[in-house]
Each structure stands twice: as C-alpha cells, then as structure tokens.
Image (cartoon, rainbow, N blue to C red):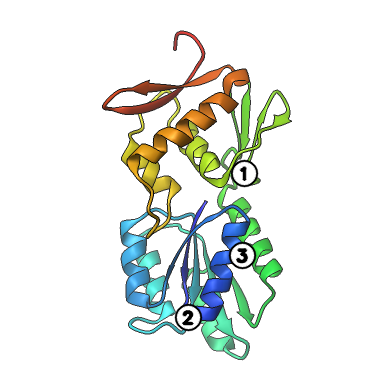
Amino acid sequence: MRILIAEDDPILADGLVASLRESGYSVDCVATGAEADYAIASFEFGLLILDLGLPKMGGLEVLKRLRCSGRELPVLILTAQDAIEARVRGLDLGADDYLAKPFALEELKARVRALARRGAAGKPTLVEFGELTYDKTGKVAKVRGEVLDLSARELALLELLLQRADRMVNKTQLLDHMCEWGEEVSLNAIEVYVHRLRRKLEAAGVEIVTVRGVGYRLQKTGPI
C-alpha cells in the first residue's frame, strides 16, 4: 500500500516515513496543505495521514476538498492533544480515524493496519491465482502454503501484476506503483525485479510473460 503523509514537522515526518517504510509500505511525504491537495489529485494512494495544522491550506480544507471530490481514500488525522474541536470537525468532514499528538509509533502502525482492513471490507483480501495466494492486507504471498521471501518492491510488483492478471502492464506503470517520489530507479531496473520475482514464482503455476516493447503480463502456466 502506498501512503501519503502530510505533516509539516520535519522530525515527526521523518520518523513516520522511516517507521512505515520499515513495515513494508511505500511512503511519500509533503509539508503543506497545497502539496497534499495536489498529490491526492495526481497520484493513487491507499491511505492519507493528515496533520490538521498544515501551512498553505489547512488539513481540514484538504479533507473537505478530498471528500467533495467523491474520493473514498481512508484518512487518519493527526491533531494536538487539546484540539478536540478540530478533531470532531475532521471526523464530521469524513476522516476515518484520528491520533492525538504525541503518540506511539506502534499505535499509529496498528491504526494504519486497521484502516487497511476497513478499506478492504466487502472486498476479497485473499487473491488466488494458480498455486499462488496473496493476502493484500497482511502483504504475504504464499505458494502451496509456503511463504515467499519477497522484498517490498517485489511485493509491490506482484500486487500490481495480480490486480491486472492476464492483462498487459507497462514498465512506467510498474515504476509508478513500486517507487516513491525522488527515488532514482531506472526503467531497466524493473527488468531485474521482474527476473527475481519470476524465479520465485516458478512453483506457483504462473509466469510473468515479457512482451518486448510493450510490458509484462502475469498468466497461468500454459495457454490462457
């Protein structure tokens, strides 16, 4: 899952980014409400962690514009300990949860996991394809019950290929899904990750097919 953090305190923001990346999430971070508003409109995220006290457009305005656009992006708001009125206003505007500062990083990660499960409510969280199963909430891939040892980028690659199984996915789409802003990853590097993942899926009855000049397709072994 790709997470956007909108937080203007650089020390807190750096801590959140490091902790969530350690947990296997792709994380992007902005420091103003205007940047958050632009990012939400321009990119796909699975969760927004939103500080209400942002400069250049407050967090409540960002949240209001998000919900007015019809987007159902889950939102976890961050507020000062005594900002009860702002907290209530945020929930009324459509936030899904809140944390009062200061907070423990472990609690934040638990709330992130809960929001991920809630966002998947009513949708299948376990994807099965050939002998491969993938738990989208737990971010665990298995082949015949055995857990695959996959890096964060290999998991992100597998996730997108499964979302579009039997359909073509080009390198640019994979790069956008796998990488955070500012990461220096070449299109050629995608071939390396595809090669690694392809080897790990050999026993799953599925294969990643390369169509030169076009992209990749995940399909079951043998005729489609």
* Mark 2 touches mark 3? (CB < 8 Å): no
The amino acid type, in three-letter code, at marker 3 is Ser
Residue appearing at x 37%, y 70% in the figure? 36
The residue at the point 61 percent across, 26 percent down is 132
Q: Position of residue 30 (x, y in %)?
A: 41, 71
Tag 1, which secondary structure? Answer: loop
Between disc 2 and disc 1, the foreground one is: 1
Q: Which residue is mark 3?
A: 19
Horizontal side of residue 174 vs 108, given as left or right: left
Q: Nearer the viewer, mark 2 or mark 3?
A: 3
Report the Cα–Cα distance between label 3 and label 1: 16 Å
Q: Are marks 2 and 1 in contact (CB under 8 Å)?
A: no
**How far apart are labels 2 and 1 at the CA level?**
29 Å
Select label 3 or label 1 by which is in front: 3
Label 2 belongs to which residue?
A: 52
- The amino acid type found where label 1 is placed reads Lys
